[in-house]
Image (tube, grey):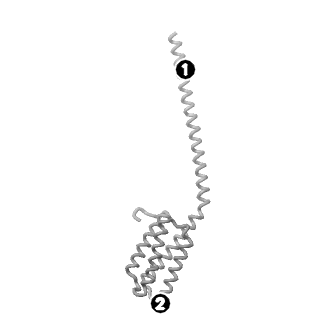
Amino acid sequence: MIEVLTTAIVSNVLVLGILGFLSRNLVTHLLTKDIKNHQNQLEIEKVRFQASFGWVYEKQATAITELYELILELEGFVNNGIYRSNWNDYQDHLGALRSKYHKTRIFIPEKLDVNILSAIKIGRKIMSQSLSDPHCDDLARELRASKELALFEMRKLLAVVGKNS
């Protein structure tokens, strides 16, 4: 009788163990399948999102590149000295920078916006001081520092910042 009882208990425990193992594997398989389906759906949504907002990033990169080129041209004027003969050219370049800045400001993050605006303000100070000091040494240093801060923010935004940038 004990043998029959032991056999019945062991067989029931064995059957329950096998059923538990199989049901656990089935649940694990179903959950893994659901997770993969969810990950695939998220990836599809990510691609759709990137495609729908890709034009924003393209416009932002173009605006940043053009603004940086204008700042470099302005810095070149200051480095060469602003004399009466090229004062109008400097004023035109500063005006082009201001115009481009205001037209593309919507695509520029706030920290970069502050840095570019600072460069423009320094450019205006240089324009008024250039009649007495063509090289504007103190303001030229400020313009370079402002340009470097803007460049750092531009690199961060365009994801080209290195470790030591």
Mark before the other along the chain sequence, 1 or 2: 1
- Report the number of numbered marks: 2
Image location (x, y in percent) of residue 66: 53, 73
> Would you identify the image quadrant in which residue 137 lies?
bottom left
**Near-viewer residue (28 or 71):** 71
Relative to 55, 145 lies left or right:
left
Q: Where 58 falls versus 8 (above or below)?
A: below
**10 Å neighbourhood of mark 2: few (<14), some, or many (≥20)?**
few
Res 58 quadrant in image:
bottom right
Residue 106's x, y, as percent? 55, 67
Residue 91's x, y, as percent? 50, 83
Q: Secondary structure at mark 1?
A: helix
Residue 89, image x and y in percent? 50, 85
Helix, strand or loop at disc 2?
A: loop
The mark found on residue 157 in the picture is: none
Residue 41 vs residue 9, the one in the foreground: 41
Amino acid at dot 1:
Asn
What amino acid is found at the position of numbered circle 2 in the picture?
Ser
- Seen at 55% across and 36% down, the residue is 28
Nearest the camera: 28 or 91? 91
Pick out the residue farthest to the top.
1
User: In the rendered image of this protein, does residue 154 appear above or below residue 142?
Assistant: above
Question: CB atoms at circles 1 and 2 under 8 Å apart?
Answer: no
Of 38 and 7, nearer the camera is 38
The quarter in which the C terminus is drawn is: bottom left
Residue 12 — which label? 1
- Residue 85, numbered circle: 2
Considering every residue shown, the one lying at the far bottom of the view is 85
Position of residue 70 relative to residue 17, above or below, is below
User: Which residue corresponds to the image point at 55% horizontal and 20% vertical from the top-left?
Assistant: 12
